[in-house]
Image (cartoon, helix red, strand yellow):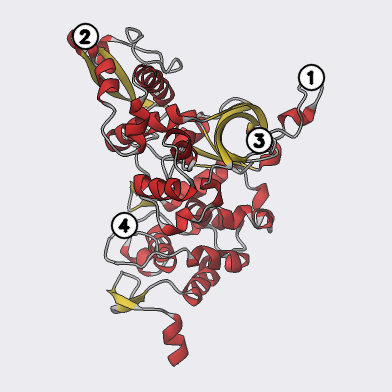
Amino acid sequence: MKNQKSNKGKKIGKVQYLWDYKKRNVYNPYKEGLELFLKEVGGNSPFYYENTENKNKIASKKSILYLYEMWNEVMGLCNRTGIHDRLRTYEPFYWFVELEHLITNDEMFWTLMTDVWCNKSEVFTDNPSILERYGRSKVSLERRLECVEHLKIILGKNELSEHRSSKGFMLKLIENDEITLYRSFKVEKGKSVRKGVKKNNNPDYYKQEEGRGWSYSMNKTNSIFINGLLGTFFYKNYLNMNDDDATQQLQKHRDLSVHMMNNITHNDNFYNCIGTYTVKRKDIMFMTDDWGEMEVVVNPKYVKLIDYRFLNIFDAMTSSLVLPIVSKMFGRSGVLNIDYLYNLFRKLVRKVVIDEPKSIIQYLTGKSWSDKVHDLIFEGGKSFSYRKFEHKGCYKYIISICDEEESDISQHPMEVNQLGISTNVA
């Protein structure tokens, strides 16, 4: 009994839901708790748990509320009620890999896996056979997205924010048979990105050798944000620093943890790249916007690498300007024309750097440098405007930069499929 208590970890409080006869202790996540939960629900369809406010069904553990709250409890995830001050660790995601065989209902697997994927996707990519167990790979993409959405509808309210991955919105993004995707990746010096060098009559040309992976995005800008452009190369190249000083400056400037600094791809032997890919709709495994990345999950053997370029100091400086704007105001997946916004800022950043090369040093040393970019954007009395509207069943924003007297963006109707910033912006 003593060992059992220690396995539960630290007691953090008490809780009582309708399905609890009395208040019970709540502990930090422990493996045995996850195992008991998966044994209980793993054989059930997620649709066995109803979206209901009926107290009897909630008390009898037949509601989505029960499935949702208990899943969050055993995994240590943030929960809707906010009553738990949980210790969040990565351990539960590794326990999930050890215990996922208990999820014998294929739809229940796709219902629960999103939280695991978003927090620790490598537990799947390092063990891809998990995705093939039982009949999991035979569940249609439409049904997989429906399973995820079902878990997020609590007491009639959809927990997915208006920018996130509703089934209807995500499926409308991939209506064509062939989809264009983007992915940022790192490549070690001296290694080839493509498997084949020659393009003509060579299918290997479209196969990626280095930097391949499972995670892609529907837009290029989010892919660049995800990369983070972390590395010592810029500090060594533009500040003439040695390895130790560059590493110290990178950690200070980007406020990186010791754990993150142990990543070998941060040294200057690795390049940052952004790739453009195509994939057949039928080969898409999963889609989620839970992290605001417009993420599309595909086994890399099914994608074609169409083109790629190396990311440089202009991209690092542009990201430092655009990411805070969209994250604070809309969420980075909320801006429909985000790629055009990024391209505009990058163009102006490049102009400022060419005119004043010292701005690179100011950026890398944490000093103010961006005023010149803002001056170019808002010169001549231009203003920053945006409009919220419904796009494919989900609320999105279009950003425009226009003359002061024309600041009402409604005067600048833009076709959604054009995704362009107002035409009066050069």
Give whichever of discs 2 and 3 has the lower sequence position. 3
How packed is label 4: few (under 14 Cα within 10 Å), some, or many (20 or more)? few
Are there few (<14), some (14-19), or many (20+) residues within 10 Å of tag 2? few
Q: Which residue is located at x 67 percent, y 49 percent?
A: 137
Q: Is residue 128 above or below residue 164?
A: below
**Can you see residue 90?**
yes
Vertical side of 334 occupied by 150: above or below: below
| Tag 2–tag 4 contact (CB < 8 Å) | no
The reply to whether callout 4 and callout 1 are in contact (CB within 8 Å) is no
Comes first in the chain, label 1 or label 3: 1
Residue placed under numbered mark 2 in the picture: 380
**Place of residue 273 in the rendered image (x, y in percent of width and height, measured from the top left):** 56, 33
* Residue at numbered disc 3: 282
Residue type at mark 1: give it: Asn
Q: Residue at x 51, y 62 (%)?
A: 93
- Which residue is disc 4 drawn over? 80
Nearer to us of marks 2 and 3 is: 2
Please report contact status of discs 1 and 3: CB closer than 8 Å, yes or no: no
Marks 3 and 4, the one that precedes in the sequence: 4
Which amino acid is tagged 2?
A: Gly
- The reply to whether the C-beta atoms of the residues labelled 1 and 2 are less than 8 Å apart is no
Label annotation for residue 200: 1
- Is the C-beta separation of discs 2 and 3 under 8 Å? no
Q: Earlier in the sequence, mark 1 or mark 2?
A: 1
Q: Position of residue 92 (x, y in %)?
A: 49, 66
The quadrant holding residue 241 is top left
Alpha carbons under labels 1 and 3: distance apart: 26 Å
- Residue 102 can be seen, yes or no: no
